[in-house]
Amino acid sequence: MQHDRRKEKQGVLREEIALIRFYIGWPIFRLVAMAYHLRYSGYENVPRKEPLLVVANHNSRKDPVAINLSLRRPVRYMAKKEAFDPRNGLFEYLMVSIFFAYPVDREHPGPEAIRRTISYLDKGDCVGIFPEGTRFDDEVLHPFTHGAAYFAWKTGVRVLPIGVTEKKGVDYHINIGKPFSVPNLQGRPHKVLPQITDLIRERIRELLPDDWEDREEEPGAQQT
């Protein structure tokens, strides 16, 4: 019992320290973001209190920070565990330390990453996911994985869609859409999740420029 209480207090302390880091780091990174011509639109669409699944396309390693700055709410992102070692890159280490990232082993993610994500949403936090799975420095909306759809379906939290575009040295735009709930579909995940993924994809596509390519399948991919 005492051990549980001590563990709980340590967890609360860690959260308080993380919040302090966030509010100290926010204005510093906001100044850095000016060099990248960061702008955002749709801030009025961001709920201030409720849990949110923040879902966006992924152009740059700066995206998690830019989205945090634009929403002005801490958004937790899964980050590769190597990013939490400053020897592997100081910039990434500062990003994951200040902006509420949590580590995941990309080779063997396991159920712990799922449990942790759901626990954050249950607590009322924002969790961010890039359904493309990795970043693409192009003007293409790439195929989505079903991770975001799974968490939206499993937890019932609203999805906040975001379109990210960047013209280096000219404009870096975070376009925030309106939050929405996914339908409460019944059935097995392999039947339900593609439908929800299509809906999430459609909402993000609406936030990107008309001339972007919408690629639902990568060239050379085999249909199943």
Image: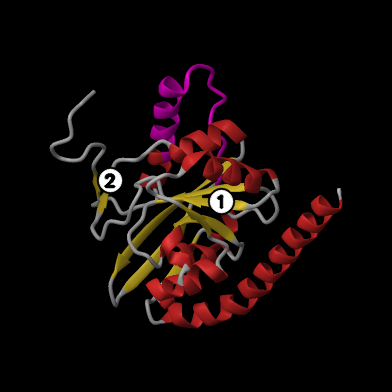
Q: Is residue 194 above or below residue 56?
A: above
Q: Is residue 1 above or below residue 83?
A: above
- Could you tell me residue 163's position as x and y percent? 40, 54
Who is closer to the viewer here, 139 or 94? 94
Residue at (41% x, 36% y) in the render: 146
- Could you tell me residue 84's position as x and y percent? 48, 66
Residue at (57% x, 62% y) in the render: 100
Q: Secondary structure at mark 1?
A: strand
Residue closest to the far left? 220
In the displayed structure image, the side of residue 123 where residue 40 appears, left or right = left
Residue annotated with mark 1? 127
Judge whether residue 42 is colored magenta.
Answer: no
Q: Quadrant of residue 156?
A: top right
Type of residue at label 1?
A: Val
Q: Is residue 21 above or below residue 186?
A: below
- Where are the magenta residues, as a range? 179-200
Looking at marks 1 and 2 on the same chain, the residue that comes earlier in the sequence is marked by 1
Residue at (28% x, 50% y) in the render: 210
Residue at (30% x, 75% y) in the render: 170
In the displayed structure image, the side of residue 126 where residue 2 appears, left or right = right
Alpha-carbon distance for marks 1 and 2?
A: 21 Å
Q: Secondary structure at mark 2?
A: loop
- Could you tell me residue 182's position as x and y percent? 53, 32
Residue annotated with mark 2? 142
Type of residue at label 2?
A: His
